[in-house]
Image (cartoon, grey):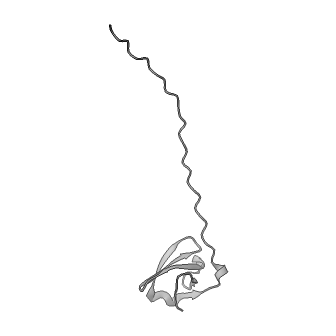
Amino acid sequence: MTIKAGNIVSHSGALEWGAGKVLEVSASMATIQFSDGKSRKIAASHFTILQPTAANSYVPPPEPAPVVKASRAKTARKKLPLPAKDA
């Protein structure tokens, strides 16, 4: 099988990862985003254990919820009286 960006594959040695979408391919490895939410780099020497799978079997990982920082409650500052000026 020729591995190209955009292909949907499964790893025959790790079916628990689910289907994966090939994100990037180089001469030495492919980066694949699997349905379990992890991105993995697979060496070119292991491309033979990647099997094509149905496009609808890939479920992209859920988007992480945005982190909302709690704002500090603003407190009123007490104004101190200015020191009296000596004449």
Q: Is residue 62 above or below residue 87?
A: below
Q: Residue, x 58% and y 72% (percent of image)?
A: 36
Q: Quadrant of residue 64?
A: bottom right
55 versus 75 height, above or below: below
Q: Residue at x 60, y 79 (%)?
A: 19
Closest to the observer: 22 or 34?
22
> Residue 21, image x and y in percent?
56, 79
Residue 56 in which image quadrant: bottom right
The answer to which of 15 and 71 lies nearer the viewer is 71
Location of residue 85 (image quadrant): top left
Nearer to the camera, 62 or 85: 85
**Quick check: 56 left or right of 13?**
right
Looking at the rendered structure, the number of numbered marks drawn on it comes to: 0
Please identify the residue farthest to the left as the structure is shown: 87
Position of the C terminus, as image quadrant, is top left
Residue that appears at 63% across and 74% down: 59
Vertically, is 86 above or below 33?
A: above
